[in-house]
Each structure stands twice: as C-alpha cells, then as structure tokens.
Image (cartoon, helix red, strand yellow):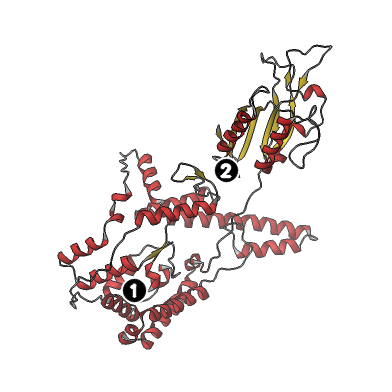
Amino acid sequence: MIAHTTEMVWQLCYVYAPTADKDETVVENFYNDIDLALKQTKKHDITVVMGDFNSKIGQGTVTDIVGPYGLGIRNDRGDRLVQFCQENNFVVSNTFYKLPPRRLYTWRSPADTPENIVRNQIDYVLINGRHRNSIKSAKTYPGADVGSDHNPVVVDIRIKLKRTKLPKRPVSMDLNRLKNPEVRKTLKVAMNSDFNQLNLEYNSNAIALDTENAWENFKVKIVRTGKSVLQPQQNLKTAEWMTEEILSIMDDRRKSKADKEKYDQLQIKILNKIKEAKEKWLESLCSDIEDSDKRHDSFNMHRKIRQMIAPTYQGRVMSTVKDADGTFITDVRDKLLLWEDYIRELFYDDREDFHNIVAVDDGPPITKREVSHAIVSLKSGKAVGPDEIPVELIQEVEETNLDYLVQLFNVIYDTGKIPADWLKSTFVQGFGFQVLMQRCLDLNCDLYVCFIDYEKAFDRVRHIKLMEILSKAGLDYKDIQFIRNLYWKQSAN
C-alpha cells in the first residue's frame, strides 16, 4: 500500500510468512516475492514491512539491524529474516527497546497455560535504515480485545525531516537591475558602443569567411558587457524586498547595543523602512502582473503571482518512470539513460543527405527594419539559450547600430552556414499546458484535450519528403537550404 502524506510517501507492505511445517522452497519464494515488491519502492520514501514472519530473532545484536532486546532464542527462520534485513537495509524496530517480556511477545501458543508458558515474538515491524531514528517506541498490547492469538504491535514513528537547500544556479547577470534607470542607461551606452565597434571591425566579406568566428566574437563581446554592467550584487539579502539601506541600518543597530535609546530609534526606523520596502516590492510585482496580463502572457503572470503569494513554491518533480518491461526506475542515472533511449527512438530518422535542390540565388535579403521589428517583438523574462544572451541586452541597441547583426543574418541566410549555438536544442518540461488548463478551469471554459501519438506526429515526418514538398511548392532556395541544414545538423540534450 502507498500512502501519500504532506511530508513524504509511505510504502507499506504487510506479510504473512509460511508456517514452520512448510519447506525451504516455499520460504525462499516468500522472500523473493517481498524483494519483487520492494523494487517498486523508492529509497527516499519510508518503507515499512510488517506482519507475521513466523520467525524467532531472539536476543543478540546484529550490527544496526537487530537490537539487543529481542525475546527468546533465534531459530533458522530467524537467521533468514536477519539475512533479508541485511540485504535490504532494514531495521527490526521492536528489538531495540528494553521492555518486560509481556510487552515483547506477539503470539501465544494454543498450548500456553499458567503452568506451561509458550509465548514467542514472531511478528515484526521492519523499517528502512534511513529512517530508523524516526522510531520512538515499539511494544505489544497483550490485553487488546482483537479476537486473535496474536498481540497487536504498536510502533510510534515521528518523522523529523531535514530541510534540504537546493543548490542555487549561479546567476551571471541580474536583469532585475535594469529597473534602475541609471543601470539601464549605462547598459544602453555600453551595448551601442559594442555594436558600433563591431560595425567598424567587420563587413559582409569578413563575416562570410568565418561565420562561426564572427558569431563567437559577437557573443563574447555582448555577454562580457552584460556581465560587467549587470553583475549580481553580493549582499546579505534574505528577502526579495530587502534593500541595501535597510541592511546598513541593521548593521548600525547591531553596533549600538550599548546605547538603548539609539538602538530603539534604529529599531523603529528599520520597521518603517521594511514596511515601505515591502509595499514597493508588492506594487512592482502587481505592475508586472498587469503588464503580463495585457500582453496575454499567462505563464509569466502566474509565475509572478506564485512569487508574491508563495515565495517558497517549487514545481513538482517527476519521481518515477517505468521501463519497457513496466518496472519502476528510481535511480537518477537509470532515468536519464531511459529518457535518452526514448528520445532517440522517438526522433530517429534513418535519412540520407538531400541534394535535389536547384541552387538559385533567389530570396529577398533580410532588412534592418525586419531585424529591429523582430527584436522589439521578443518577450522579456525568457530563459537564455546556449549563447547566454538575454533578449534584454539586444533590445537596448538602437536600430541605427544594427548593421553588424543584419550582415551576420544575411550571410547565414545566403550561405546556409549556421553557428553551432543555433543548432543546439535542450529538452525542457513544458509548463504552459498546465497554466492553460488551470485558466480554463478558473474561467469555467470548455476544455478539450487531445492526446497525440508522437510516432505519427510532425516530429516523425520524414525530412527527405519534407524537403521535396518544400521544393515543389516553390519555396526560395535559401529558405530550403536553411531548413535542411537546421534539421540535418542540429543536436539535442
């Protein structure tokens, strides 16, 4: 049984072992069945195996597996149970607490009498070793009215989870600093200066000789400028609304502990500043939410809302997947290999190179106005690609200084030589569908969900056939050449 709680997932397995009159083959099959069930569990969850094992572990410590307070003398079945616990890193919880025998025995023989006491401990509660410290007590209740010759075993488990801090990805540019007019002005001047320098250093012929090098020089220069101007500030901010001024006043307060009057004044000042900073931060977030709503950008709108009402929100992480045989995969490395095989099979296309294109120098050139319009139309706040260039940097460049970028695009379009960064794809989880579905539910709209067989979807179209259709449709040679190189030379991770 799987029980989902607010803290974590519990995997509960109840067993009934073969009785003493069964042979060893039946016993081994019993433990094999348990092993098969445990393969469906995950290491970080709490796994409990409990029930009637028809085994006597008895007294005697076994490393961290068996405690010193068992009851009776261990038998062969007890040795097999200990072996099972060692193989699967289980702890026998009801052998670690010093109790009177009446609180240890779990089964009373039909032959038990006051003169001939026959009582054994054959029921156990096993828990994975990772959570052994969560067991606070384990004892039986012989006086319980349960209508059985077995006594109930009650185990007190109290989970105390350690807060894990996810490693933060180092931020090379703090785009939030663009909200400061002075920083934005500095970036605008620096970016336009870089583009003017590129316009002077390169012309179309120089770019055509080495397109990859021209793109690398452009990328390095732009990223270097962005990192220098938008360098993240190193401070002690513990909240997004915290300001440098408040931190400075807090430092003064810390130094003024000997002067109570001054300390109290600074305390009042800090509280007022915090209130102002929080209000300003919330107003800024609300403004961003309204702007996203006006642009119909539901993804960023909901992201900002979550940031405002639940700063510690974390997206759900896929925890289990199944392989082709239906077996659950829990190891991270095995999951990655499984996804790699799945993606390779899904998108694989056994194709030869396509040369049946008549090389005609046709197709209009890319104009500066088109490039400028495309840059302005891009949405801000998007994740960067392998080139690490945020769109916010390019948007600070004036249209008159876009000559280098226009020349670079035209050379790539004319020659079909695409930079390596443009050919790299990364598989990411799609969040937009969940947002759209939730929005439909919120607005009580009809929702139609179409499940697609990806083996028959567009990604499984034969590219050779696609190129032939585009060629027959009269698409410009440069367009077909660019699409062909994009499909044939791209890579993904």
Q: Which residue is mark 1?
A: 418
Q: CA distance from mark 2 to mark 1?
A: 44 Å
Task: From the viewer's side, name the closer residue of 182 and 444.
Answer: 444
Q: Is residue 390 above or below residue 168?
A: below
The vertical placement of 243 against 6, above or below, is: below
User: What residue is rendered at 37% in x and 69% in y?
Assistant: 422
> Mark 2 highlights which residue?
42
Q: 131 or 262: which is nearer to us?
A: 131
The spot of residue 436 in percent (x, y) is 36, 47
Left or right of 314 in this view: 268: right
Seen as rendered, the residue at the extreme right is 115
Rendering coords of residue 313 (x, y %): 53, 49
Q: Quadrant of residue 66?
A: top right
Foreground pick, 216 / 199: 216
In the picture shown, does residue 18 fall above or below 189? above
Q: Amino acid at mark 1?
A: Ile
Residue 164 drawn at (x, y percent): 63, 51
Q: Residue at x 59, y 35 (%)?
A: 32
Asked which secondary structure carries label 1, the reply is loop
Place of residue 410 in the rendered image (x, y in percent of width and height, measured from the top left):
28, 77
What is the crowding at mark 1: few (fewer than 14 residues within 10 Å), some, or many (at least 20)?
Answer: many
Would residue 407 be seen by someone viewing this image from the given angle?
yes
Left/right placement of residue 75 relative to residue 274 reads: right
Q: Amino acid at mark 2?
A: Lys
Q: Earlier in the sequence, mark 2 or mark 1?
A: 2
- Determine the secondary structure under disc 2: loop
> Residue 24 lies in what quarter of the image?
top right
- Please indicate, yes or no, whether residue 289 appears anywhere in the rendered image: no
